[in-house]
Image: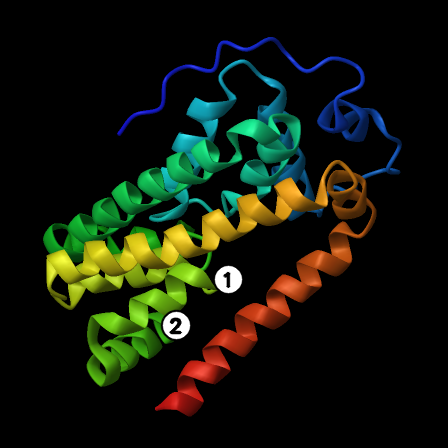
Amino acid sequence: MIPPPDTSPDPGPTDPIHEAAEAPVGPVSRWAIHRRLYDWVLSLAETKHATWSLFALSFAESSFFPIPPDVLLGPLCLGKRERSLWFALVTTVASVFGAVLGYVIGYWAWEAVQGWVFDYVPGFSQDKFNTVQHWYDAWGVWVLFIAAFTPIPFKVFTIAGGVFAQPLMPFVLISAAGRGARFFLVAGLFWWIGPKAIPFIDKYFNLLCLLCVVLLLGGFILLKLMH
């Protein structure tokens, strides 16, 4: 499923995304790459091709890109709340397609690309990859649901799923279930919270990043304890 181009007019000056983009937030240090990537992704919500950007971001995040699509999904749901379910569907479908790409990379091309992946793809390391292999050995393809729903780097699991030859159809179905549950929940929350969400994220960005790291580490610890 490929989303149609978003032909609606650009947000006006009263749009919450537009206001947040213009709000003074102080200087961003040169080292704050995560913040710069966040700002760039957020700016995509103001373009007429926002839906395509959401599709591309969701697709890429499942195999190599470090910024989760929730960063763009949320602002789009705020700016066009009546299309929240559509945006969640686009994000889910694109993410599953990206998961399949990750699976194909792992299954067919891992020997050729593993050095580049470990060196340049954020979230990958040999230790993490070995841990994911251990979890796949212990829990099979079902462990993919936890990665799809939580902040655990999904791309590590999608590529590893191909490397360790997990059954493809369950892989796709579990990816769709986990990603769908997450993105429809995010879309619903942003629709419910309303325009106040963007200034809140902008004001407490560093704290939220820390929270994501805590959740990420907690997810890994939880899976380790489950074994």
For the point 76% across and 28% down, the residue is 16
Mark 2 residue type: Lys
Return the residue at label 2: 128
Check residue 70 in the rendering and tell me which mark sits there, or answer none: none
For the point 22% across and 56% down, the residue is 173
Residue 168, image x and y in percent?
12, 57
Indicate whether 116 appears above or below 17: below
Q: Quadrant of the N terminus?
A: top left
Residue 125 visible here:
no
- Local crowd size for mark 2, using a 10 Å CA cut-off: few (<14), some (14–19), many (≥20): some
- Give the CA separation, mark 1 to mark 2: 14 Å
Left or right of 137 in this view: 220: right
Closest to the observer, 105 or 68: 68
Return the residue at label 1: 151
Q: Quadrant of residue 156?
A: bottom left
Residue 145 visible here:
yes
Indicate whether 55 appears above or below 150: above
Closest to the observer, 112 or 188: 188
Residue 7, image x and y in percent?
49, 9
Indicate whether 42 appears above or below 117: above
